[in-house]
Structure formats: structure tokens, C-alpha cells
């Protein structure tokens, strides 16, 4: 009987060990999509051997952690592995791309908008969480390795051995300019990314001193109000301004006051980079250096005797975003944010009402910079249900919008239609609210967006919409640019729009805004901006956006042309096999002439 009991215990232990090993294997294999394909793409046998060796070290480290007898260290490393795996696997499921150093840096800047990600990609996040839950269980279920080392040796091993794959990946990143981690075990890549960012920050030294404004305004005839509206996630080629039968923009009826520059390229394909680069007048030659040292648009406005106002339709309770610091905030005379209780679909309408009051009641020259709510995901909830112009749409569930893993045609259509409904409301109804009977004789409004939107018309996998760093869709950088005014400068802007159609970049807007504030073009070119203004003779082939703006180790930004995106979208929308691009249910196709004539869209 005693021998039978021993055999049973050994059998139970063997079964538990088998389950533990199986779950560890499932955790590692399922969380590391694309690793085998990555090995096949390496350019030399030596690189392949190094890749396999690093994988071997990483797998040994995972198993060492799983059999570690010290509970504290095992729990600590379990948390590290689970969080790192969750981040990389979620990113893969959403974008079908590896999580890279540049992605991590951008995501760290967007932590304040985590709720948007959870509300839009709940299925992908829950799938990744389920895989990580398997890993957590496997790492912490018995049996564990007996404590064969002395206490000091156990502590040293618990710290050093799991750090070996992290140190190895850090070495790969530093030797390859921040690249080279594709396909390596995701359990250790995110800690390596954070380590590299930390090392870079430590050795980069103190931040350089920001320059003061070195020029003075000389032009007397300038508008009382200069307003820059930076919309969110609005694709310029989808609006009725830039295509027949496009999404209602609310601007065609105001064509007498419009200079439409058509489809232009954004500075970057991510909000923080585009907004910050514009506010500091960054150019293409040395963007990171200029971002750290240039004076802000607020400083130029204040030196020109303009009151500065920032209207933020996205954040609340004084929280800052888009790389704005407290130092920059101190340059703003009035910071307007909406209550957190304001529903998403009402935020842009309230911004429009606030902006109207500022323009109508200004008693002194005023410069206003606006961040709209716009069309950032999640799309549902950003327009009233009765204003569903395009169907089908994404279904809202208790977990958020229903984006399945597989990108079937029906889901792609709903994905697109939900976005188009958001555009029609947060662009069209916004301008209906703002511009109705508004006197623009002493006001200039510059309207653009921080980046475009990838709706995957080219059939690319995943549901990533913007902020991609590799294989970026050109549609992520396609944005509108419109100047609205009844002031004499309208003629100059219309001539510039006609002359430079298909050549304008968002980089050209900053020097033009400085000119509106009263600065002389020669002074702007000499001291304030390395980019030509909108009315210059712009060179062709410069409509590019940066997918990797915050570059490291001396590498240049990664630039992408928007031309292929325009062509791809046009082919997709004209394909006989695809649904008509902008056929709204009982609306847009039939009532587009009415929209042009009256300025009122379907249901308005």
C-alpha cells in the first residue's frame, strides 16, 4: 500500500509537470506570432544562428522562472513576462505587425487614451489576455525546482538569469539603430525596449535651452482673429470638398469664403507628433532638434500682441496631451476644456459653440488653437443614432465595438461606414454649428487634421487605423486643408491653392500662420521656419508624412508618400466588386445636390 501511494504521488506529480510544460509551450508559441517566418527572412546563416541562440536563452529563462522556488521573484518575473506578452500580442492581433521600439515610444505618449483602445479593440485585448492568463497559470503552478543553491546564490540567479535575454535584445537594438527585435521572444522584448529608451534618455544629457522669438511683426493689416483647427483622424480624400458625392463636410455651402488646398500630407501619422511639430514650427531637415529648441506658436502670437486661447475638445480636468508641457501651458492665456460629462458626440458641437463666442466677442486680437474630438476610434457613440447615414455599422456590445479577429468583407464595410458616419457628424455638423451666419470679415480659420485613417481598402490585414511605424498605409497621412475667411487674404490663399494643388504639406502651414499674425515672409524664412509657406512655388513630390518621427541613434525619420494611398483608395471605391463607397441609406447619393445648394445634409 505504501508503494502504491508513492506511485500515485509520483504519477500525479508527473501529470502536473506535463500539464505545466504543455501550458508553458502553448504560452510561448501562441504569443510569438511570426517568429518562424522572421527566421526564414534573415539574410545570412550567422544571423539565423544568433536568432536561434537568443531564442534558446529566452526559453531557458522562461523555464527557469517557471521552476523558481522563490515566490517573490517568480511573481515579479511573471508580471514582467505577462505584461510584455500582453502588449506585443495585442499589438499583433490589432495590426498584424511586430511591436517595435518606435511603437512602444508612441504608445507611451498615448496612455491617457487607453480607454479608446479598450473600447475599440476589446476582442483582440481579451484574446491576448486569455493567452497571458495561461502563461501566468503555467509559470506559477507546481512543481517547482528544489532550492539547491545557497540563499545568496538563489537571489543572484533570480535576478541575473532572466535578465540575460533582455540584455541580449538590448544589444541587438543598440547595434541595429533601434531595430532588429522582430520575431524575438515577446516575453522579453518590451522590457528591452524600455531599457533602451531609458539608456538613451540618460546619455542624451540635459534638454537644450529653447530659443526666444527673434523676429518682430511688421505687417499692420492682419486679421483680428486667427484660428487653427486641428481635427482628429479626418481623411481628406473622403470629404465632399475633395470628391464628388463625398462625406458631408458642411463647407460647400460656404464656398464663397473657402480656399480649398485639396488633399495634403500630414506631418506624421500619429497625433502627438503632428500636433507638437506644428505648434513648434518643425521642418523636415532636423525635426527632433527643432522640436526641442524652436519657440512655440503661442510665443509668436503673444509677441504679435494676440491673446492666446487653447480649446481642447479631447481631455478634461486640466490634463495635457500631444506632448504639451506645463512650460508650454504657461504661454497660453486661456485653456478651455469641456466637462468629462459631455458625451463624445456632443463634444465637437460644444467646441463649435465656444469658438463662435470667442470669435463674436473678441475685444482684442486673438489666436486660437483647437483640438477637436474628430473621428478617432471608437467610432460608435461619436454621432447620434438617428444620424446613421451609412449602414451597416459596427455593433456596440458591453465590451465595446465588435471587431472580430477575421477581417471579413461585412465587417470591413461596417468598419468603414461607422467611420463615415462619424465624419459626417463631427465635421459636417461641426461646421454647420460654427459657421451659420458667422462674420468672417476679420477672422481667418485654418482647418486641417493631425493624420488620416487606414480603412484597409487595399486588403491589408488587421484593424490598425494610424500610428503604424512599418508598412504604413499612405492613407494614414491624407488630410484636408481649408482656409476660411472673408478678409482680403482669401484671394491670396485661393491663388496659392490653385497653384500648389497636389503639392502642399502640413509643414507649409506654420509659416503661413505666422504671416497671418503679421510677420514678414523674409523674417519668417530667415529665423522662424525652414519650410516654404502655402503661397510659395512649392516643389512637387513633397507630400510625405513621417511614420517614425521620434527617431533614435542618428537615423532619419521614415517618410511615406501619400500618392499611392490616393490611387489605392480610388481604385477600391470604383471597383465593381466593392460596395458603392458613399451610398448612404436614403441619403448622400440622392441628396448631394441639395447639400451643395442649401448646406444642410440628410436629416438637417
Image (cartoon, rainbow, N blue to C red):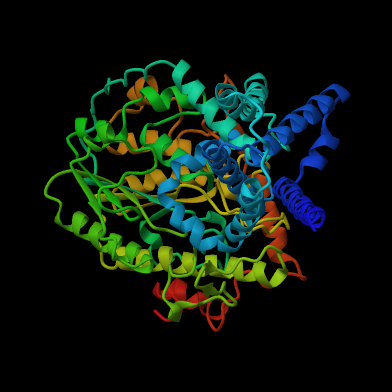
- The answer to whether residue 540 is seen in the rendering is no
Whether residue 528 is situated above or below residue 512 in the rendered picture? above
Q: Which residue lies furthest to the front in this view?
A: 1
On the image, which quarter does residue 580 sit in?
bottom right
Q: Residue at x 32, y 66 (%)?
A: 349
Q: Residue at x 59, y 22 (%)?
A: 153
Q: Which of 441 and 473 is in front in this view?
A: 473
Whether residue 455 is situated above or below residue 191 in the rendered picture? below
Q: Residue furthest bottom?
A: 586
Q: Position of residue 105 (x, y in %)?
A: 51, 36
- In the drawing, does residue 282 fall left or right of residue 66? left
Q: Quadrant of the C terminus?
A: bottom left
Q: Which of 134 and 154 is in front in this view?
A: 154
- In the drawing, does residue 244 fall left or right of residue 2? left
Q: Where is residue 428 in the image (x, y as percent from the top left)?
A: 42, 66
Q: Position of residue 460 (x, y in %)?
A: 72, 54
Q: Position of residue 285 (x, y in %)?
A: 52, 23
Q: How many labels does the image show?
A: 0
- In the drawing, does residue 262 fall left or right of residue 600? right
Q: Which of 299 and 60 is in front in this view?
A: 60
On the image, which quarter does residue 357 sit in?
bottom left
Q: Residue at x 54, y 51 (%)?
A: 452
Q: Quadrant of the N terminus?
A: bottom right
Q: Residue at x 50, y 76 (%)?
A: 593
- The answer to whether residue 575 is seen in the rendering is yes
Q: Which of 15 and 299 is in front in this view?
A: 15
Q: Which residue lies furthest to the left in this view?
A: 363
Amino acid at each position: 500500500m505504501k508503494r502504491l501511494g508513492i506511485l500515485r504521488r509520483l504519477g500525479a506529480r508527473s501529470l502536473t509537470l506535463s500539464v505545466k510544460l504543455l501550458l508553458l509551450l502553448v504560452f510561448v508559441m501562441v504569443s510569438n506570432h511570426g517568429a518562424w517566418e522572421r527566421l526564414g527572412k534573415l539574410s545570412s546563416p550567422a544571423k539565423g544562428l544568433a536568432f536561434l541562440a537568443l531564442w534558446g536563452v529566452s526559453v531557458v529563462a522562461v523555464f527557469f522562472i517557471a521552476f523558481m522556488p522563490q515566490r517573490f521573484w517568480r511573481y515579479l518575473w511573471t508580471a514582467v513576462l505577462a505584461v510584455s506578452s500582453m502588449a506585443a500580442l495585442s499589438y499583433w492581433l490589432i495590426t498584424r505587425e511586430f511591436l517595435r521600439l518606435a511603437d512602444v515610444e508612441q504608445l507611451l505618449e498615448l496612455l491617457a487614451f487607453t480607454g479608446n483602445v479598450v473600447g475599440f479593440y476589446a476582442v483582440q485585448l481579451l484574446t491576448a489576455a486569455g493567452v497571458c492568463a495561461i502563461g501566468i497559470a503555467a509559470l506559477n503552478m507546481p512543481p517547482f525546482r528544489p532550492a539547491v543553491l545557497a540563499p545568496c546564490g538563489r537571489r543572484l540567479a533570480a535576478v541575473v538569469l532572466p535578465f540575460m535575454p533582455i540584455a541580449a535584445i538590448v544589444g541587438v537594438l543598440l547595434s541595429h539603430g533601434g531595430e532588429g527585435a522582430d520575431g524575438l521572444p515577446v516575453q522579453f522584448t518590451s522590457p528591452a525596449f524600455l531599457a533602451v529608451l531609458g539608456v538613451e534618455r540618460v546619455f542624451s544629457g540635459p534638454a537644450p535651452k529653447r530659443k526666444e522669438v527673434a523676429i518682430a511683426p511688421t505687417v499692420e493689416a492682419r486679421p483680428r482673429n486667427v484660428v487653427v483647427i486641428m481635427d482628429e483622424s479626418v481623411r481628406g480624400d473622403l470629404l465632399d470638398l475633395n470628391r464628388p458625392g463625398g462625406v458631408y463636410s458642411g463647407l460647400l455651402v460656404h464656398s464663397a469664403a473657402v480656399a480649398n488646398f485639396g488633399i495634403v500630407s500630414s506631418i506624421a501619422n500619429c497625433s502627438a507628433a503632428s500636433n507638437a511639430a506644428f505648434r513648434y514650427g518643425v521642418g523636415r531637415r532636423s525635426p527632433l532638434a527643432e522640436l526641442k529648441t524652436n519657440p512655440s506658436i503661442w510665443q509668436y502670437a503673444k509677441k504679435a500682441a494676440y491673446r492666446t486661447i487653447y480649446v481642447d475638445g479631447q481631455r478634461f480636468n486640466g490634463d495635457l496631451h500631444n506632448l504639451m508641457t506645463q512650460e508650454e501651458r504657461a504661454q497660453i492665456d486661456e485653456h478651455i476644456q469641456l466637462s468629462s460629462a459631455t458625451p463624445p458626440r456632443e463634444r465637437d458641437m460644444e467646441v463649435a459653440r465656444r469658438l463662435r463666442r470667442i470669435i463674436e466677442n473678441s475685444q482684442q486680437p486673438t489666436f486660437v488653437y483647437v483640438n477637436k474630438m474628430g473621428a478617432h476610434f471608437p467610432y460608435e457613440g461619436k454621432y447620434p443614432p438617428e444620424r446613421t447615414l451609412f449602414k451597416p455599422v459596427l455593433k456596440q456590445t458591453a465590451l465595446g465595438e465588435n471587431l472580430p479577429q477575421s477581417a471579413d468583407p461585412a465587417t470591413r464595410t461596417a468598419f468603414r461606414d461607422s467611420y463615415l458616419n462619424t465624419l459626417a457628424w463631427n465635421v459636417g455638423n461641426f461646421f454647420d454649428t460654427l459657421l451659420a451666419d458667422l462674420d468672417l470679415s476679420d477672422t481667418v480659420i485654418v482647418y486641417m487634421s493631425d493624420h488620416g485613417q487606414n480603412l484597409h481598402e487595399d486588403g491589408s490585414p488587421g484593424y490598425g487605423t494610424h500610428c503604424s511605424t512599418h508598412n504604413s498605409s499612405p492613407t494614414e497621412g491624407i488630410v484636408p486643408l481649408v482656409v476660411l475667411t472673408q478678409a482680403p487674404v482669401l484671394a491670396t490663399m485661393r491663388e496659392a491653392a490653385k497653384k500648389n494643388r497636389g503639392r502642399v504639406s502640413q509643414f507649409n502651414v506654420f509659416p503661413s500662420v505666422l504671416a497671418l499674425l503679421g510677420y514678414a515672409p523674409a523674417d519668417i524664412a530667415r529665423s522662424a521656419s525652414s519650410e516654404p509657406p502655402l503661397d510659395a512655388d512649392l516643389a512637387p513630390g513633397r507630400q510625405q508624412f513621417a511614420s517614425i518621427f521620434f527617431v533614435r541613434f542618428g537615423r532619419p525619420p521614415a517618410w511615406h508618400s501619400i500618392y499611392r494611398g490616393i490611387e489605392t483608395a480610388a481604385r477600391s471605391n470604383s471597383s465593381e466588386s466593392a460596395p458603392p463607397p458613399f451610398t448612404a441609406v436614403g441619403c448622400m447619393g440622392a441628396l448631394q445636390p441639395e447639400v451643395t445648394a442649401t448646406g444642410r445634409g440628410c436629416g438637417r
